[in-house]
Amino acid sequence: MHIGFIGLGNMGAPMAANLANSHEVVGFDTSAQPDGITLAPTAAAAVDGADVVITMLPNGDILRAVADEVHPAMKPGAIHLDCSTVDVQSARDVAVKAREAGLSAIDAPVSGGIGGATNGSLTFMAGGPLDAFKTILPLFDIMGQKVVHCGDAGNGQAAKICNNMILGVTMIATSEAFVLADKLGLDRQAMFDVVSTSSGYSWSMNAYCPAPGIGPQSPADNDYQPGFAAELMLKDLNLSQMAAEGADADTPMGELATALYERFVKTENGKGKDFSAMLPRFEKRGRD
C-alpha cells in the first residue's frame, strides 16, 4: 500500500518506520524529522495518491484541522486511519467529514506506549466501517499484536478512554494499598504475593507494579521514568470525564482519579514521571 503518515513524534515515528519495511510510506510532521522515513514538505503532499492516511496527533482540535487540510487532497475511496487519542466527538465528526469527501475513516487509538510502537506490539481499539477495517488489517498486524473492532465511528476512542479510566483508578488504589501495608507493618513482597494471586489481582499490580523491586520490572525500578507519563494519564482521564458528562454517566471514581492526577501533575511535580509514581506521592502524605 501507499501510506501517508502525519504526526511523526515519539509514537508515530516508530509506527511509520515499521510500516516502511513493507509499504511505501511518506510522512509529514510540523517539527519532527525522523531518519529512515521519506518526508513531504506539507501534509497535503504526504497524502497525495495514498491508499491509507494515518494520523497520530496530540488532540481533537489538531485532528480536525489536519482532516480539513488533507481530506480534499486524498484520492476518492482512500481510508483515513486515526491512531490519536482524542475525544469521542472529534473522532465522530472527522468520520462524517471523511464520508462527505468520499473517504472512509477508522479511529483506532493505541495501547502499549513507545515500547509497543517500536516493537510493533501495540493494541488497537478500532471504530468505523467494517469493510474499511478489514482492508487495513494487514497494517495493524505490522504495527501491533492485537486489534479489536469495537463498532461504529468513535467507538475506538470510547474503548480507549474507558480502559484508561479503569487503569487510572486501579493504579491509585494499588498505590494506596502499598502505603497502607507499609504503615501496618506488612512486607511489600508478602502483600504482592497475596494480592497478585487473589481477588485484588489487576494489571496495575501484576504487570506494572508501582513498588520498586516487586513483581516484573516496571518504571518503578527506573526511578519512575515514564513508560506512560502521568500527564498522558491525566489527558485520558479528562477525556473520560468529558465523555461521561456528554453521556450523562455517573463516574465518581473516574472523577476522583482525574482530580488526583491533575493535582499530581500540576502542583506536586508529577509531570514527566510515570503514572505509577502515585506510590511515592502517597508515601509522602498522611491522612488529611
Image: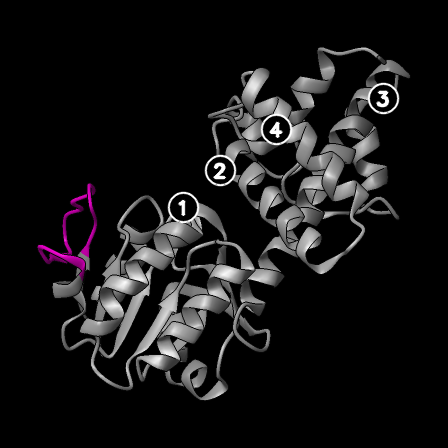
Q: CA–CA distance between discs 3 and 1?
A: 32 Å
Image position of 22 (left or right of 201): left
Q: CA–CA distance between discs 1 and 4?
A: 23 Å
Tell me the SS state at disc 1: helix
In the rendered image, which residue does mark 2 sit on? 227
Quarter of the C terminus within the rendering: top right
The answer, for residue 108, to whether it is visible in the render is no
- Kindly identify the amino acid type of the residue bearing the numbered disc 1: Ile
Q: CA–CA distance between discs 2 and 3?
A: 25 Å
Q: Closer to the camera, 131 or 113? A: 131
In the rendered image, which residue does mark 1 sit on? 114
Q: Which badge, 4 or 3, is on the more N-terminal residue? A: 3
**Within 10 angstroms of label 3, few (less than 14), some, or many (20 or more) residues?**
some
Query: Is label 2 or label 4 in front?
Result: 4
Name the quadrant containing residue 98.
bottom left
Residue at 81% across / 37% down in the picture?
193
Image position of 238 (left or right of 38): right
| Colour option used | one colour
Q: Is residue 19 above or below residue 79?
A: above
Tell me the SS state at disc 3: helix
Q: CA–CA distance between discs 2 and 4?
A: 18 Å
Tell me the SS state at disc 4: helix
Q: Position of residue 94 (x, y in %)?
A: 41, 67
In the rendered image, which residue does mark 4 sit on? 262
